Image (spheres, grey):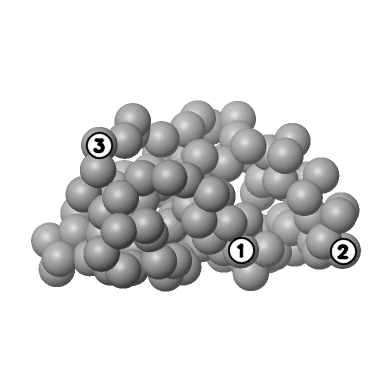
Amino acid sequence: MRDSKNRQPLPGNGQKAIGVTWYENEQQWLETRMTADDPDNFYDSYEEWKRNSERRLAEIRAAGVVVEKVAMDVARFRVWCGEQGLTNSGGARAEFAARGLAARDVPVGGRMGDC
């Protein structure tokens, strides 16, 4: 997971969670990579990204850190970048994921659908 690691407080106990950009399918991943300022920071394939990301999420969770997947909505991300005056960079993707996580009203440990 080279992409989008942010800690955001969630409602409730003040514990922090890491929001990670999550590509639900190869098309989302490809669209984001093709327009990225930093395509070299992406894995060579969606399958490689997903395998490594799932492994890394499991490692982080095993260490007791709360991690939430934040689905990448490519169209919304583009609009948001335009509004913020940002380009498709790792920092912008991380901020987008952080804002997506902060917008959720789910306490740490609460049940959420798998993004």
Instruction: List the residue tagged with mark 2.
Output: 85
Q: Position of residue 25 (x, y in %)?
A: 50, 30
Q: Position of residue 50 (x, y in %)?
A: 38, 43
Identity, as a three-letter code, of the amino acid under mark 3: Arg
Image marks 3 and 2: residues in contact by CB distance under 8 Å: no
Q: Earlier in the sequence, mark 3 or mark 2?
A: 2
Q: CA distance from mark 1 to mark 2?
A: 13 Å
Q: Residue at x 25, y 37 (%)?
A: 111
Instruction: List the residue tagged with mark 1.
Output: 95
**Circle 3 Cα neighbour tier, 10 Å, few/some/many (<14 / 14–19 / ≥20):** few
Quarter placement of the N terminus: bottom left
Query: Residue 111, labelled with which disc?
Result: 3
Quick one: SS at disc 1?
Answer: helix
Left or right of 48 on screen, residue 46: right
- Tell me where residue 97 sits by quadrant: bottom right
Identity, as a three-letter code, of the amino acid under mark 1: Glu
